[in-house]
Amino acid sequence: MDTISFLSSMVTAIADGKKTVTRRPLKTQPPDSYYYHGVTGEEVWFYSSPRGHSNIGDYFTLKSSYGKVGNSLLVNEPWLPYKTADGAGIYFEDGISVLHPEALKLCNGNGNGSLATKWRSPSSLPNWASRFKIEITSIEVERLHDITDEDIRKEGIYLDYLCPQTEILTQKLSRKELFVQFWNLCYQTDFPWESNPWVWKLNFELK
């Protein structure tokens, strides 16, 4: 499965209420010798001494890129601009298209009926084109390998979203093996599964 298809399947899972949690690596990982102490507001705290130690020692903090509990986030997904005789719009990997006058500025002079062949990055999706919004209900931090079977299910790993991806289905992977493969599609370069990075665990609900 390629990254575009995976990301699109996760958007479908969010829309169907089957994906209610997501993990994102801490952009800067704490020193190996530091202990996790918790999340306060928008920050995660690590100390050089275990929790409850009389001399807590040096600390490491990192601010969440996702804000705090109650914040709303737009869901980004792969997209393409297009224009036809009826107007310009945004086309999504699941086949849904949405007309919007602002899309005309993104078509780079393509003629009527044209559609670019290369998907654009989810992070570049204009805010006005986002189809879904989520609200953060809790923020935690944990090691990636601490993920449970139940949380893997809450991550939206369902085979019914992968039916077109026969190469995945024929491998007969377990749900956890699928999650590992999907994680590495997105983070293999800097935060591969094998490195067991610290991750933000964001629980959310669709608004």
Image (spheres, rainbow, N blue to C red):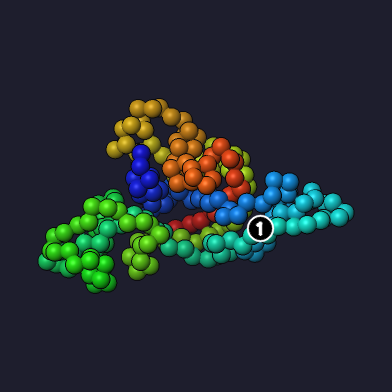
- In the image, taking residue 56 as reference, residue 123 lies left or right, namely left
The residue that appears at 50% across and 35% down in the rendered structure is 176
Residue 148 appears in the figure: no
Which quarter shows the C terminus?
Answer: bottom left
Q: Relative to the observer, which residue lies in front, 130 or 58?
A: 58
The residue that appears at 40% across and 27% down in the rendered structure is 172
Q: Position of residue 153 (x, y in %)?
A: 48, 41
Q: Is residue 87 above or below residue 44?
A: below
Q: Amino acid at mark 1?
A: Val
Total marks shown come to: 1
Where, by quadrant of the figure, is residue 196 drawn? Answer: top right
- In the image, taking residue 137 as reference, residue 186 lies left or right, namely left
Q: Position of residue 82 (x, y in %)?
A: 21, 62
Q: Position of residue 54 (x, y in %)?
A: 88, 54
Q: Residue under circle 1?
A: 44
Residue 171 appears in the figure: yes
- In the image, taking residue 199 as reference, residue 89 lies left or right, namely left
Looking at this view, name the residue that lies furthest to the front: 189
The residue that appears at 41% across and 39% down in the rendered structure is 158
Looking at this view, name the residue that lies furthest to the right: 54
Which quarter shows the N terminus?
Answer: top left
Q: Relative to the observer, which residue lies in front, 96 or 18?
A: 96
The residue that appears at 51% across and 56% down in the rendered structure is 204
Local secondary structure at mark 1: strand
Q: Is residue 133 above or below residue 33?
A: below
Q: Position of residue 169 (x, y in %)?
A: 36, 31
Q: Residues within 10 Å of mark 1 (few under 14, many from 20)?
A: many
- In the image, taking residue 92 as reference, residue 202 lies left or right, namely right
Where, by quadrant of the figure, is residue 56 drawn? Answer: bottom right
